[in-house]
Image: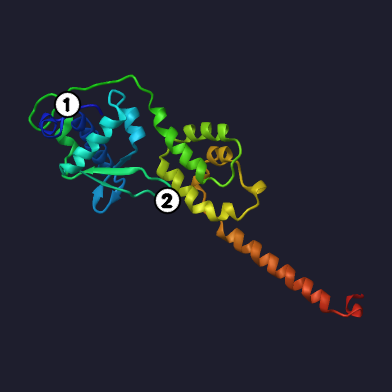
Amino acid sequence: MHSFDPEIAKKVGLNAAVIYQNIVWWAEKNAANGKHLHDGRHWTYNSVKAFDVLFPYLTTAQIRRALEKLEASGLILSGTFNKMGYDRTKWYCPSEQIHLSELANGFVRNDEPIPVIKPDIKPVGKHIDHFEDFWAAYPRKIGKGNARKAFEKAMKSVTIDEISSGLNSQLDILKSKEQKFIPHAATWLNGERWNDEPDHNKENNSRSHATLDAIAIAARASRSPSEDCF
C-alpha cells in the first residue's frame, strides 16, 4: 500500500504519511480478519529491514525518522507482542480507529484521490531477516542452505508467528533428544511440523518404561538362583 493522506503529510511529512497509511491499511485489514488483537487494538508488525523492502525509495534512516515522527506526534502506537523471546520485531497500530470503508475507491477523507506508487520489488526478501532468527533458535544446525529454501517456501503460506509459536511449543522436547534424533530444520519446515502438537505423552511413557525396566532388573537381582529355575 503506497499512498498518503495530504492532511497527515502536512503534519509529519510525506515519508511518514506514506508509512502511516501502510500501517493503517494493515491494522484495519487485520481487524476485519480478527487477527493480531492485543490490548483491545488490532496491530501490524514489521522490522525496519522489512520496511526497507516495502519502501525501496526511502533510506533506512528516513524510515526510522518517519516512524519516530509518527510515534512522537501520537499518530501511531508501538508495542512488542512477539511469541519468541529473541524476536525484536516492533508492532504498530494507528492511535485512532480508521475504517477501510473510509479509504475505499482510492479516496481519503477530504475526497482527494490517493496517488499510488507501484515500485518493482520482490516481496520474498522481507522474510530473509526472520530466517536467521529461526536458525538461531532451532536446536540442530545442519543443512542451513536447504533450511533457508524450506523457510522461504513455508513463508509463502504461513506467517512467522505460526512458525515461531510452533517451534517454541516444541523446543523443550526437541532439545531433550539426542542430536541424531532431531529432524533437520529443512525436514521440520517441509513437513509443516509447526502444526504438530507437543508429544508430552510420548516423553512421559518413555520415562515410565525406563522406570519399570529398572524395577524389573532390581527384582531379578534380589532373587535367589533357585527362583529363576523352572
Query: What residue occupies the far top of the structure in this picture?
Result: 120
Q: Is residue 162 left or right of residue 53?
A: right
Query: How far across and down, in percent of the image, does residue 27 sit?
Result: 25, 41
Query: How far across and down, in percent of the image, does residue 225 sit?
Result: 91, 78
Q: What kind of residue is marked 1? A: Gly
Pick the quarter of the image with the N terminus. Answer: top left
In this view, 224 is above or below 57: below
User: Residue visible at 47% across and 48% down?
Assistant: 166
Query: How far across and down, in percent of the image, does residue 169 sit?
Result: 48, 53
Q: What kind of residue is marked 2? A: Gly
Return the disc, 1 or 2, that comes first in the chain's sequence. 2
Quarter assignment of residue 202: bottom right
Which one is nearer the viewer's eye here, 78 or 105? 78
Q: Looking at the image, do the residues carrying marks 1 and 2 touch, with CB atoms under 8 Å apart?
A: no
Query: What residue occupies the far left of the structure in this picture?
Result: 110
User: Residue visible at 10% across and 31% down?
Assistant: 10
Between disc 1 and disc 2, the foreground one is 2
In this view, 118 is above or below 79: above
**Tag 1, which secondary structure?**
helix
Crowd rating for badge 2 (residues with CA inside 10 Å; few <14, some 14–19, many 20+): few
Query: How far across and down, in percent of the image, does residue 194 sit?
Result: 49, 45
Q: CA distance from mark 1 to mark 2?
A: 39 Å
Which one is nearer the viewer's eye here, 85 or 171? 85
**Tag 2, which secondary structure?**
loop
Pick the quarter of the image with the C terminus. Answer: bottom right
Crowd rating for badge 1 (residues with CA inside 10 Å; few <14, some 14–19, many 20+): few
Q: Is residue 156 visible?
A: no
User: Residue visible at 59% across and 41% down?
Assistant: 141
Q: Which residue matches tag 2? A: 85
Q: Which residue matches tag 1? A: 106
